[in-house]
Image (cartoon, grey):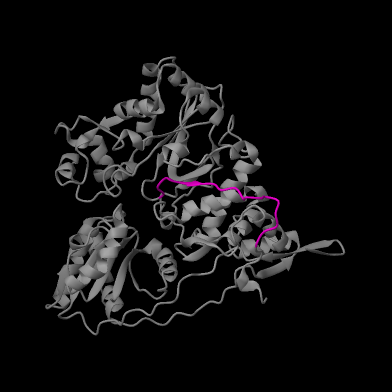
Amino acid sequence: MSATGSRETYAVVWPRGTKAVEIAELAPRLGTLEGKTVGELWDDLFRGDEIFPILRAELARRYPGIRFASYDRFGSTHGRDEHRVIAELPRKLEELEVDAVISGMAC
Amino acid sequence: MPSVSLVCEGFVGQATATAAGLGMPTLPPAVLPGHVDAQTDEELEANVLAAVDAVVRGLTADPEPAGVTAEPAAGAIVFEGTFDEVNRFFYEHEWSDGLPIVPPTVERVEEFLRFTDRDADEELGILLPDRRAATVWNVAVNGVLAGCRPEYMPVLVALVEAMADPRYGVEHSGNTPGSDTLIVLNGPIIKELGFNYEQGALRDGFQANTTVGRFWRLYLRNVAGFLPHKTDKGTFGNTWRVVLAENEDALARIGWTTVARDQGVTQENAVTVGRYTGGDVIVSVFGTRPEQMLPYLADALTKQTGWQLMFTVGMGTGSQRPLLVLSPILAETLAKAGLSKEDVRRLLYAEARMPAWKFERYIGEWTNLVPGRRTLVELVRAGEAPPVFAESEDPDRLVPIVCEPEDIMIAVSGDPLRTNAYGFVHNGILGYTVTKPIYAPSAASAPAAASRPSSTAAS
């Protein structure tokens, strides 16, 4: 703190915390969804049970060889068991040979 | 693995900010217009079909790389100016809650550090959504901002340890119910630091209760990273709550335990945090016997509980923990009748009930918060709810609002001579009740072992 005439000033510090995250390179996108397996992750909210079937139908129309691993294979990503569900994802995605994921619903 | 997130229109900002906090600022969303809950089946289908291109693009097209924004080092001087200039600077940078802040000079921060034995650099946890380090240093900085006194520092450190506990779920603090945390304080520290624990226990005006409550929300803003219109999506929100200090003289007189002891913490000085969606005063609890008083108290808890039943059965089965605050005269009346705190919980659990059909409406038909519109009987049969919710198939049967008597928390505070109570409704796993001990420094008047964070040593 210093005083310049009647103007008392304050040298103040940053109130935030250092970010502990490094920017992660996103996984390479797929060239096509044809012949791929798409996993569904759902937080059990906001009509995901109606939305995912609509997506499946339309994606299957566009990509006849596409396959799906339904959200009920993984568990809810937002609930009492969310940490366990997330922790188990790498193994389950590998077991089910999932190539890409659609995650919902952020509402 | 490539992924795309389905995001309703109003949540794109939060999704982007949250993705950045996870280190993936370019994670692609596929946006659905409006809010899906307000759309007819036909509208929903049309909107989902319209988003399929974005879904495909998110999984097959590489996004543009994100820029990196440089930030100051911990402890860096970021500005010098008058009181008004500092306040304007902090407000413009969203580091202030809009009330005047106390300029956090190094000298002021170091005053706070005298009241902890812990090193300024010590990391208390990493807080989502911004994934920033919570440190003893930035606890002190935000304590200064909030107008706390330096001697509150041990309380502030314990609070941030609670915030960083994974059981609390700080990452959910931007949810749309906009719940706010209640801090319950126990121990001799209440009197030592001048916390109010009597009439006006939830009122601002007492420096300790008020500034520590303000600190919590400033810390959520500045270190966890919750900002309205960005990561904080509270539809309405609540402002921060003043600290509720228990009346431990009253508890001692009647032989009841403190909230901290109920939570399993044996140290005398402790803080308990939990997020509550709301509450209401329960006025004029009339009577001299439990059978006169408890039905009214139970009815109040039941009336206040609605969509939160999803934390009793549903998203967070067994995590709903309503808090009943009894004024000392009410607690004393119940204790005079021979009731322990456990007895009161058990009796409230038996009384605080609603018809099964209404419970099912709250979690199903009215909110769709538990998908599939299943009945409680179906949920019990699927192993997703405890048996108490399906003791018969009669839709009019009465079911409890919590899973177990122990889920009801009871605190004693407020005007010792008025027969009012207060009920808080809990946000379940999205702010679960966590208790942490408060550790006073070994020598409060000794100089701090470290001052500014070592990252600024060369600056």
Residue at the limit of the structure toward the right, as seen here = A5
- Residue B326 appears in the rendering: yes
| Position of the C terminus of chain B by quadrant | bottom right
Percent position of residue A6, x then y: 86, 61
* Rendered location of residue B303, percent (x, y): 36, 32
Question: Compared with residue B355, is residue B93 higher up or lower down, i.e. above or below?
Answer: below
What is the quadrant of the N terminus of chain B in the image?
bottom left
Q: Is residue B251 left or right of residue B195?
A: left
Please tell me whether residue A13 is drawn above or below residue B421 in the rendered image.
Answer: below
Q: Which corner quadrant of the image does residue B347 belong to?
A: top left
Task: State whether the magenta stretch is mostly helix, strand or loop.
Answer: loop
Residue plotted at (61% across, 40% down): B204
At a point 15% along the width and 47% down the height, the residue shown is B382
Q: Residue at horizontal 24%, vertical 45%?
A: B364
User: Is residue A39 located in the magenta-colored stretch of the structure?
Assistant: no
Q: Quadrant of residue B9?
A: bottom left
Residue B157 location, x and y as percent? 56, 53
Residue at the limit of the structure toward the left, as seen here: A64
**Residue B36 or B414: which is nearer the viewer?**
B414
**Which of A56 and A23 lies nearest the eye of the viewer?**
A23
From what the image shows, is residue B278 above or below residue B81?
A: above
Does the magenta portion include B444? yes
Numbered-mark total: 0
Closest to the observer: B457 or A44?
A: B457
* Residue B31 shown left or right of residue B119 in the figure: left
Farthest residue, direction front: B442
Q: From the viewer's perspective, is B188 left or right of B394?
A: right
Residue B42 appearing in the image: no
The part of the image, by quadrant, that contains residue A12 is bottom right
Image coordinates for residue B85, horizontal then vertical, percent = 72, 63
For the record, the magenta segment spans B431-449
